[in-house]
Image: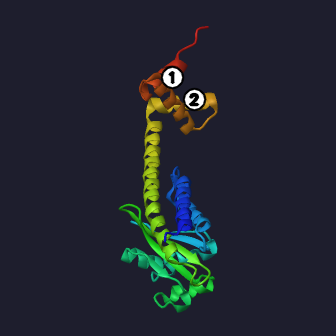
């Protein structure tokens, strides 16, 4: 028999997750939102964490409960449910940590923090980032088959959303580099300076003004800048 309530809860979770991450352009902020949303939306889950492995960078961590962030942090040791899930590319579940022997050091810390059950599901983001989302319960036996299904769907959906965040993050970085190059270009930089003086705005805001003018007039940005600089540098008639 289909657990209708569980299906509805999971659907609501995925909708909320999409709404929460759809416009985010910072990967770390996306992880923070992800773990908070999952913690609040999944019944019997008391906290949620994310372990992220990024090529050429230290492992990243996000935790809905900062006091329990060490459970997701590989600096405390690689023998964890999260790393096991990432390494094996499969979901890992431990319903009762009092009976668990796979990660003795981690399990002792988890129990000391009041955690007695965990599900870790691998998350594929892109070629540079992989990770695991970790659902924690304070009560042994609280995490059930339904939670495993939710974790699987959550991991798949989160992977797609986080990949999109990474794409937007790269686009923002590329746009920033382009803006820097434009500001260093003679006539565009001069035009930006004119607008900043006239409007009392920042350089990025002044560049946006130039872009808006170029789009409205349907002419290249450089030509708009040249016209503006020519206008302000033209001697006024007495």
> In the image, which disc is placed on residue 195?
2
Per the image, label 2 sits on a secondary structure element best described as helix
Q: Is residue 215 left or right of residue 139?
A: left
Q: Residue at x 55, y 14 (%)?
A: 235
Residue situated in front as seen by the camera: 106 or 237: 106
Residue 186's image quarter? Answer: top left
Residue farthest toward the left in the current orientation of the protein: 127
Image quadrant where one finds the C terminus: top right
> Pointer 1 and pointer 2: residues touching (CB < 8 Å)?
yes
In the rendered structure, which disc, 1 or 2, sits on the residue that comes first in sequence? Answer: 2
Question: Whole-percent x and y of residue 155?
Answer: 46, 66
- Looking at the image, the residue that sits furthest to the front is 1
145 on left or right of 129: right
Say which residue appears at 59% left-offset and 65% top-offset: 41
Q: Secondary structure at mark 1?
A: helix
Above or below for 178 versus 168:
above
Locate residue 107, reporting x and y percent.
Answer: 53, 86
Which mark, by number, is residue 228?
1
Q: How is the image coloured?
A: rainbow
Q: Is residue 58 visible?
A: no
- Camera sees residue 234: yes
**Residue 159 falls in which quadrant of the image?**
bottom left
- Badge 2, how many Cα within 10 Å: few under 14, some, many 20+? many
User: How many other residues sit within 10 Å of disc 1, few (<14), some (14-19) or many (≥20)?
Assistant: some
Q: Residue furthest top?
A: 238
200 shown above or below 53: above
User: Distance from label 1 to label 2 (Cα)?
Assistant: 9 Å
Q: Where is residue 206 shown, x and y percent of the image?
A: 55, 33
Could you tell me residue 153's position as x and y percent?
46, 65
> Which residue corresponds to the image point at 62% horizontal and 86% vertical from the top-left?
112
């Amino acid at each position: 028999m289909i657990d209708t309530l569980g299906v509805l809860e999971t659907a609501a979770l995925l909708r909320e997750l999409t709404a929460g991450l759809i416009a985010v352009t910072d990967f770390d902020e996306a992880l923070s939102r992800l773990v908070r949303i999952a913690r609040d939306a999944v019944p019997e889950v008391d906290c949620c964490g994310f372990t992220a492995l990024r090529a050429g960078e230290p492992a990243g961590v996000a935790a809905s409960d900062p006091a329990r962030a060490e459970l997701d942090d590989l600096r405390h040791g690689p023998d964890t449910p999260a790393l096991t899930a990432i390494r094996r590319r499969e979901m890992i579940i431990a319903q009762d940590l009092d009976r668990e022997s796979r990660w003795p050091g981690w399990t002792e810390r988890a129990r000391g923090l009041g955690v007695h059950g965990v599900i870790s599901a691998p998350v594929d983001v892109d070629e540079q980032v992989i990770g695991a989302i970790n659902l924690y319960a304070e009560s042994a036996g609280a995490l059930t088959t339904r939670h495993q299904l939710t974790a699987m769907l959550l991991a798949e959906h989160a992977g797609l959303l986080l990949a999109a965040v990474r794409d937007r993050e790269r686009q923002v970085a590329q746009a920033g580099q382009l803006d820097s190059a434009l500001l260093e270009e003679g006539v565009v930089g001069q035009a930006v300076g004119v607008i900043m003086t006239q409007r009392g705005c920042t350089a990025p805001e002044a560049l946006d003004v130039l872009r808006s003018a170029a789009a409205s007039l349907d002419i290249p940005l450089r030509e708009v800048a040249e016209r503006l600089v020519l206008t302000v540098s033209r001697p006024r008639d007495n």
